[in-house]
Amino acid sequence: MRGSIARGVGLAAVVAGLATGSGRAEEVDIGIAPTPDSWSRLIVSDRGLHAAWVSGAGNRQQLVRDGKVVGVFASVRGALFSPDGDHLAWTARRDDTWQVWIDGRPGCDYSAVTDLQFSPEGSHWACIAGGSGYCPVVVDGRTQHSFAWSEDVAFSADGKRLAYIGISPDGRYSLVVDGRTVWQGDKAASPAFSTNGRHALAVVWLRDGQHAWRDGELGPALVGVGRPLMSPDDAHFVYGASDGRHQFLIEDGRPGGNYDFIMNPGPVFAADSRHLAYIARTGSREQVVIDGRAGATFDRIDPLSLTLAASGDGFAYAASRGRRWVVVDAKGPGPEIDGVQSGTPLFSPDGASLVYGAQLGDKWRLCIDRLMQPAFDDLGHFPPAYSGNGRWIYAAKENGRWFVIDGHEHGPAYDAVIGHAVIAGSEIRYLAARNGRLLSCSGRR
């Protein structure tokens, strides 16, 4: 929706990419491009060089990967790429059963399949299979413990550990970590691992209240406990909490300031673990709290916009007062604008440059380090990418055509540039669509 953070995007706005500087790119036709009826079901790998979508309707749906049909099914759901982009998984119905397909190979038949996911490093997959009364977790095709219901499947970052919640027919909850039941009780939720995978985390319920759980140790009894989190360096343990009157953050056993609400998604650490931030609400006002210090209050802070620089002291978030938005950073609020591009603001890897997409009237501009760039009709859905030397690469629409731009240099014109580009030294690669064909593009910056 225009004029807000969560704005809608047009068909050609599933876009990101890189310009070639010279305005030319080597283009290889690899197959059919997404049609208008399938663009809403388009998925793109995290590294941007693979795309898949479902086309068709009724009992004849086809899954297309990188321009080529890989199967026709009665129904297709939950297609996703592994984080490294090397694998594609989906669930498909044939007759009255569902199967998990991995890279074109079908698995066993189930009455239902939910929560299909890859491990963060891409080498394992898991799902919840079955239906009422029998709903086990399946990992790499192997069924784990049998429960009446399973939920909240979570891998560690290296894919070597797995946790989930199992529910018995009598309603008793089990926390399962690495194939072993490590806790049983009235209820459990939100299993997770620390960044290095050494610690297992969860929230559990006992008669005296809710507790944060870490490797078998319980925190204090509280009315409410949010998802536990550890800092990337494994040195700090935090979670949101409620005593029934207020909500607050507990960091390493110490409670912070009181607020009406700690807003989702909860606390966020900087990559170097030096800073911790979250969004809090009191009455009708919201503010960002960084390292225990509360900032200015606003009518609303976009919960997905809060970002901390990977190193240094940089922070940024999008906030509104009335109908106008600003992006706030360490220097204070930026200029008033009508909307902020989804996925922004964001920092360069070194934390030195900050970028966001800004709507002013019916035009969109990229704002780089508080300097507004040229105006376009749209900036697309995917956020910009940092190309080094203070330059950001982004997609823009003008006069019905999409371009990718590196600094001020335009690349070729396309109907769409699909997904994220990959930068390898001086070479750039991305997928684009023109005249109904999917193109694999490469060039030099």
Image: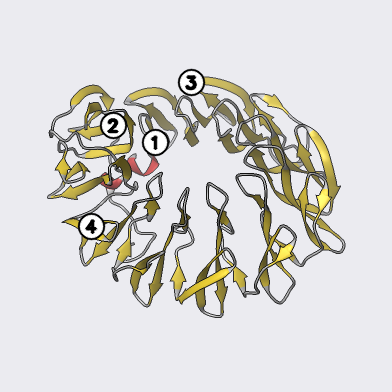
Where residue 52 is drawn, which disc sits there?
none
- Whether tag 4 and tag 2 are in contact, CB under 8 A, the answer is no
Q: In the picture provided, is 266 more to the left or to the right than 363?
A: right
Q: Which residue is mark 4?
A: 365
- SS category of the residue bearing label 1: strand
Q: Which residue is mark 2?
A: 431
Q: Nearer the viewer, residue 326 or 188?
A: 326
Counting the numbered discs, the total is 4
The residue mark sitting in front, 1 or 3, is: 1
- How crowded pointer 4 is (Cα within 10 Å; few <14, some 14-19, many 20+) is rated as many
Q: CA distance from mark 1 to mark 4?
A: 24 Å
Q: CA distance from mark 3 to mark 2?
A: 22 Å
User: Reading the chain from its start, which is encountered first: label 1 or label 3?
Assistant: 1
- SS category of the residue bearing label 2: strand
Which residue lies at the image location 81% right of the left edge and 34% below the top edge?
Answer: 180
261 shown above or below 364: below
Residue type at mark 3: give it.
Gly
User: Reading the chain from its start, which is encountered first: label 2 or label 1?
Assistant: 1
- SS category of the residue bearing label 4: strand
- Whether tag 1 and tag 4 are in contact, CB under 8 A, the answer is no
Q: In the picture provided, is 130 more to the left or to the right than 438?
A: right
Q: Which residue is mark 1?
A: 44
Q: In the rendered image, which quarter is residue 374 located in?
A: bottom left
Q: Which residue is mark 3?
A: 104
